[in-house]
Image (cartoon, rainbow, N blue to C red):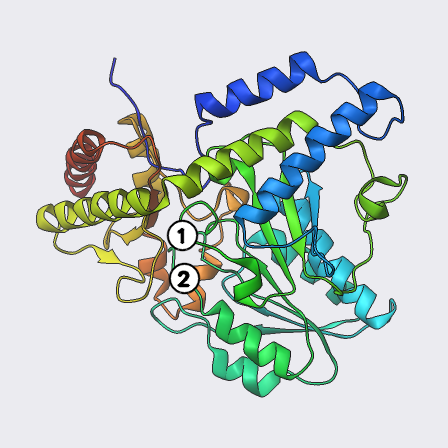
Amino acid sequence: MVKSIYLDHNATTPILPEVVEAMRRVWLEVGGNPASQHQFGRQAHRVLEDAREKIAALLGAEITGPEPDRLIFTSGATEANNLAICGMALARTGGRPGALITSSLEHPSVLGPAEHLLDLGWRWDTLGARRDGIVRLDQLQDWISPETALVSMTAANHEIGTVQPIAEAARICQAHGVPLHTDAVQMVGKLPVCFRELGVSAMTIAAHKFHGPVGIGALLVRHGTPIQPVLFGGHQQDGLRPGTEAVALAVGMATALEISVQNQQEHIRRMTALRDRLERSLQAGWPEIVIHGRCAPRLPNTSCIAFPGLDGQVLFTALDLAGVACSIGSACMSGSTEPSPTLMAMGLSKELVLSSLRFSLGATTTQEEIDEAVRRILEVCRQLRG
């Protein structure tokens, strides 16, 4: 049987054994509800808050000082983005319609709540993208106004991996007194991130993107940033996210983040080398390929490649049968028949967009897997070309 090669780490990463062990200990030894007042509840609360403080510190936030930031645990990035977009925007306007700005490169979990605000009577402006996959900040400078309640811009694109100028966008927003939220799900664990230095008002992360558990994410909120809940029915986390916190998952998230930060520079070097090897080898065997965002700053693990003349959906299916797992766009858009909104926003032809696949690497990816994946990809391409 052909051994499968997993090149879809931007969708989710395999959980690390050390993370599983850390969570196992919590499940076995910490049995209380962190909201309970008895000794079992107090023990669970201490473990939860230790994990919260560790995550915040690793991300360059401060939740224990005189002007503490807030780290709100959620079920994942989708919930955190909904809390950020709707909770921050509505808190700024007192529930009245206002104006929202996002980029055209956002994940569906940002676009969805933006569409919800649009249905509530909000104005929604979408920043364009350059052909290299970088958001047009000149438009942000022109469009931001006193009516703008919130700007949301991804830190690194989920499809092509382009790293966006978030700190520069934050300076523009600060000059106009407008909060900036960033979906940093694809960046955290892959590149150094310091929340305070970025200058953003809120930042979304998700544990399963850096070899942590599925089912937990977080929203970091800067001190003094207005935000209101989008879920109701409990007092947990200052009422901003009601519901019993998953203590073991929080510990797993903290453990995975700590490991990723400790090994970050070596990880960046190794991922960059493997990504470049993948791209060079594919181009040597199939010169027509187009590597999206190649000339822009990119995540070290992400490569989005067009195979002109081939149908991306057919190629994806054939590669899956050949034992190479990759993706068409984001996992949250899986099954959609529409061309990638990200690639279309870059001004690429529809034919080029429809021939594109994303390959994303992770800590478990090896050079041998890259070489074998290249061999299989080229073989499948030749078969499809006939």
Secondary structure beneath dot 1 equals loop
Q: Cα distance, mark 1 to mark 2?
A: 10 Å
Q: Which x, y percent locates residue 368?
A: 18, 29
Q: Residues within 10 Å of mark 1 (few under 14, many from 20)?
A: some
Q: Which x, y percent locates residue 98?
A: 78, 75
The circle on residue 163 is: 2
Q: What's the amino acid at mark 1?
A: Leu
* Foreground of the two, 100 or 375: 100
Q: What's the amino acid at mark 2?
A: Val
Residue at point 45%, 70% (across, down): 165
Front label number (1 vs 2): 1
Residue 369, located in which quarter of the rendered image? top left
* Foreground of the two, 314 or 152: 152
Report the side of 152 relative to 150 (left or right). left
Residue at point 50%, 70% (across, down): 167
Residue at point 46%, 33% (across, down): 211
Q: Residues within 10 Å of mark 2 (few under 14, many from 20)?
A: many
Marks 1,2: beta carbons within 8 A: yes
Report the side of 166 relative to 322 (left or right). right
Report the side of 45 relative to 161 (left or right). right
- Per the image, the residue denoted by label 1 is 191
Label located before the other in sequence (1 or 2): 2
